[in-house]
Amino acid sequence: MKFTLNWLQQYVQLNNIAPEKLADDLTMLGLEVDSADPLYEELNGLLTAKVTSVKPHPNADKLTLCQVAVGDNTVQVVCGAPNVREGFCTVIALPGTILPGDFKIKKSKVRGVESQGMLCSERELGLSEEHTGIIELPDDTKHGQSFLEISDLRDILIEVDLTPNRPDCASVIGIAREVAGKYRTQLSIPFKDIAYKQTSPSFSVEVENAELCPRYAARLIRGITIGPSPWWLRKRLLSVGMRPINNVVDITNFVMLEYGQPLHAFDFDTLADQTIIVRTPLQNEREFTTLDNVKRPLDPDILMICDSKGPVAVAGVMGGLDSEVTEKTTNVLLESACFNSISIRKTARKLNLPSEASYRFERGVDPGGTLNAMERAVSLICEIAGGIAEQDGIDVYNGYKPVEPLRLRISRTTDLLGLPLTLEQVSELLESIEIRCTKQDNDTLVVTPPSFRVDLEREVDLVEEVARLIGYNDIPISLPSVNLSYPQQDQERIRRNAVCSIMTKLGFTEAINYSFYSNSYDAKMLLGETDKRCSHVKILNPLTEDQDVMRTMLLPGLFENIRKNIRFQRTSCKLFEIGDLFFPVQGKPLPDEVPRIAGVMTGNRYGLQSPLHFKEDDVDIYDIKGAVESLLEEMRLRNGSEMNVIRLIPAENGTVEPYAEEEYSFSIIHDNGIIGSIGKVKDKVLREFGIKREVFYFDIDFKALAAIPPAPKEFAALPIYPSVKRDIALVVPAHTAAGHLVDAVIASKEKLVEHCDVFDVYQGDKIQRGYKSVALTITYRSQTKTLTEKNVEKAHVKLVSMLTESFGGSFREA
């Protein structure tokens, strides 16, 4: 939006406020000022002049020799303008003056006669395209004066970058309203609160779609004379970069910039049956010729202004060629309307026809200001073009929508702005920009947004208005009272990230497979018909036939990963995956999602490491078991002085997975329940997947794993006293797990025991059938002193006695 400082002061008193201060205040009001530049600075050197005599040029028929008075001097100028005459007041550029376009005036000879300057036309000064003659000033103009001062051209051009939610400021009056509110001065508007009748004896108006055209007003003006506009009007348009055309068109453009209400003037005598119909095109109306003499295609949803024969204008965008105002026009029908913003935006895009009018209509024109702008234009046309307006016009307002009042709480305003405000202060601020307020109670205002403020929809919008008018820089800085507690974090997500990091450190690579696979995997994994994992959520539109159900196991995807790696000569793999399994729930539309973690190992124990450093041994059951134990220890689920939180025991009948070898299977136990398994995959299963190598796996319920609280972290100083080790070799029944002996030693709570481990299990010669030898090494240490033989022996005898009694064991003889 462009306007000048002098133009703005026609509606609001600025009280000598500096342009820089005004630009800063407008920006803080939310109207960002892009530039504020002096106008016509290049015309500083031009002076007024008076032609005292005119003689024919001795050597040219079309040139004249003029004596021109410029202050105390008289200069001779050769001129070719047809309108020059004796006593003519105009503008002169003396030698040394630089005109727009970097054209420097010099003394010169024209057809042998000296010329000491140039009498200027409007085009030569960059004011317009007029070049039929030199500029004519009033006869009483004093010569030798600054042309900028005499013509009132010295001004400041301000350009504001408007946001889409402030269409009310796409006008000089809209900007002036904001300025008046900021500086608490009076706003002066030429016309307001105008009303028309609904009929006219000379023409009729019909609006077929009130949704697309909520309001349409028209007024007839007879007996006008089309001609050039007066200088003050042309100056206003030129100052903002708009080209003057004729007095009627210039007035419609001026009022559009002044009120933000686009207007259109029809040649009344070209309208068939003196009728205006606002409608969309008929089926046979497929193109229309606009003012720029271009035929444009019409869509059925484009709103048109028509007479009884057909379209005469594209509503809100551009008029038609056949009804435009020309030099022969004597009667004008003036249109002022409010069109649907979305409809105009679509029309302007479809026709590729942006205009000043569509710019305003597509953002939202004030329906309450339609007649005010109309009356202003009618008044100017009658004054400048000599017309006589009919007493009343037609105002069709079928799309009227009452404005819903808003309630503004002063306490809420105070809380949001951090300022102590009273109801009277807030009311005064809002009233300063014509937002009407009434008191409901001591803390509440009932606010009625004006029709030109389409952006005021909520209480917080009104709070923002108060903040703008106070001034953001005047709102004190304060720290809000903030609860520094943070929301509860998802422990399962935290555990998942930690597990991924641990598994990666153990040499595994994370795999991410699709959550859907083929139901043929049930048979390949040797699952029984009653197995829960054979119940699937079916996909209605699968990507492929091999992805027709949601998965109930992670292992098939990992087996496929191994097969693909082997095909690419990656024969050693350590993979793991954390993902959801999906099980249908009867009576519910969504399945039950169960997170799980699974891993597989195959090939060389050390992967792709060089055989120069590591022996090429294949992985076995102890590698996968060790990986799980390391994972659990890193998660602090196997540490502490109590019995292990999670135990790994050989799988028994009924707990072995159908796809695992029974002799190589372990169950992962927590709280007497199985939460996972470890084992070797059956060769039959591997053949189904095309794998010819041994594969070991683990599969754990991740939700159950994440729900187990880890052992607390404890700190202990490094030991300063030496440790003592003692070995025990016991013969126990073959069914006794060696780990149970270790558990018993730890659970004894003997305070000198620091560590216990199995270092040998033996069955064979010298060991009777049904028994085995288990050798333990126990580390003793005191935190307060160096142990003596007597201290260690006492504790050791006590543990030996406990083990022999608890497990029916005996000392092994050498």
Image (cartoon, helix red, strand yellow):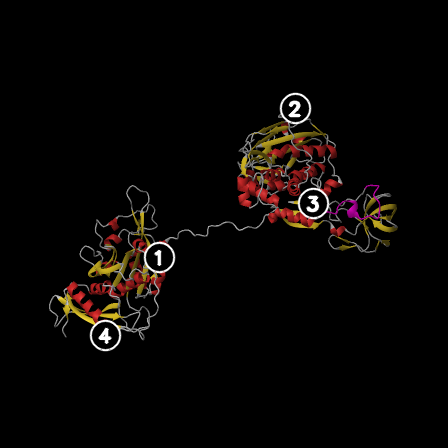
The quadrant the C terminus occupies is bottom left
Relative to residue 724, is residue 697 depicted above or below?
A: above
Q: Earlier in the sequence, mark 1 or mark 4?
A: 1
Residues in magenta?
Answer: 138-156
The mark lying in front, picked from 3 and 1, is 1
Where does residue 737 sit, x and y in percent of width and height? 19, 63
Specify which label sits upstream in the sequence, 4 or 3.
Answer: 3
Residue found 67% across the figure and 47% down from its top? 22
Report if residue 165 is visible in the image: no
Query: Badge 3, how many Cα within 10 Å: few under 14, some, many 20+?
Result: many
Label 2 vs 1, first from the N-terminus: 2
Q: Which mark is residue 4?
A: 3
Mark 2 or 3 closer to N-term? 3
The CA span between labels 2 and 1 is 84 Å
Badge 4: how crowded within 10 Å, few (<14), some, or many (20+)? few
Q: Quadrant of residue 698?
A: bottom left
Name the one closer to the observer, 362 or 445. Answer: 445
Residue named by callout 2: 201
Which of discs 2 and 1 lies nearer the camera? The answer is 1
Pointer 4 residue = 789
In magenta stretch: residue 141? yes
Q: Three-letter amino acid code at disc 1?
A: Arg
Q: What element does badge 1 sit on?
A: helix
Residue at the spot of label 1: 495
For mark 4, give the secondary structure. Answer: helix
Give how far across and how far down residue 595 sits, in percent: 32, 53
| Main secondary structure of the magenta stretch | loop
Residue 653 seen by the camera:
yes
Instruction: Count neighbours of disc 1 (C-alpha within 10 A) and say few if under 14, some if 14 to 19, many if 20 or more.
Output: some
